[in-house]
């Protein structure tokens, strides 16, 4: 997807992916049921901006755990302000190995995170949500609806965790 407008090209360009992208915040239950999808954000939007602007924080129940990857390090206070607890893998330093406690926590988080990766893989099985999918600019304003439909179809598939 490369927008025809130079301004849109600029804000959707992701240095990390080296192409124009849209980002979505997706939340699911522990068993893999999609429960929240944000509107599209341009590829340059930070994870913190997406979390703050998506409306997700208002849905967090008091005491709820929110599992996120390492990239979401700047949202802990936002999640805490909403009453939740951010759960992220411990950060690895080049100088110090993980403590035994952090190593166990990292393994525990990884065992849950694999299900999130499977959920993302299910989204990407749909051609329009596949990595490097080329989306017609005529569908740009409908893409949020397309992603919601894909989420519904993903929810109708067999459970991620049996």
Image: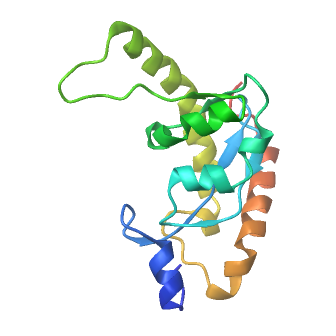
Q: Position of residue 34 (x, y in %)?
A: 75, 44
Q: Position of residue 27 (x, y in %)?
A: 69, 42
Apparent side of residue 146 relative to residue 74 in the rendered image (left or right) = right
**Residue sitting at x 71%, y 35%:** 82
Q: Position of residue 70 (x, y in %)?
A: 44, 37
**Residue sitting at x 35%, y 8%:** 100
- Residue 157, can we see it? no
- Most extreme residue toward the left is 95
Return the residue nearer the eye: 51 or 120: 51
Applied colour scheme: rainbow
- Most extreme residue toward the top is 100
Return the residue nearer the eye: 157 or 7: 7
**Residue sitting at x 36%, y 69%:** 18
Name the image quarter holding the C terminus.
top right
**How many numbered callouts?**
0
Return the residue nearer the eye: 94 or 21: 94
Apparent side of residue 157 relative to residue 67 in the rendered image (left or right) = right
User: Where 154 falls versus 127 (above or below)?
Assistant: above
Residue 53: image quadrant is: bottom right
**Residue sitting at x 71%, y 56%:** 38
User: Where 6 falls versus 149 (above or below)?
Assistant: below
- Residue 75, can we see it? yes
Q: Position of residue 107 (x, y in %)?
A: 45, 19
């Amino acid at each position: 997807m490369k927008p025809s407008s130079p301004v849109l090209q600029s804000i959707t360009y992701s240095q990390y992916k080296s192409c124009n992208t849209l980002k979505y915040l997706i939340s699911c239950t522990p068993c893999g049921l999609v429960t929240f999808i944000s509107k599209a954000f341009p590829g340059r939007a930070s994870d913190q901006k997406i979390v703050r602007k998506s409306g997700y924080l208002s849905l967090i129940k008091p005491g709820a755990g929110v599992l996120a990857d390492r990239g979401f390090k700047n949202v802990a206070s936002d999640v805490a302000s909403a009453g939740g607890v951010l759960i992220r893998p411990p950060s690895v330093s080049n100088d110090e190995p993980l403590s035994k406690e952090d190593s166990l926590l990292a393994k525990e988080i990884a065992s849950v995170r694999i299900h999130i990766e499977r959920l993302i893989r299910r989204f990407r099985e749909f051609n329009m949500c596949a990595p490097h999918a080329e989306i017609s600019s005529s569908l740009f304003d409908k893409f949020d609806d397309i992603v919601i439909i894909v989420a519904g179809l993903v929810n109708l598939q067999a459970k991620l965790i049996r």
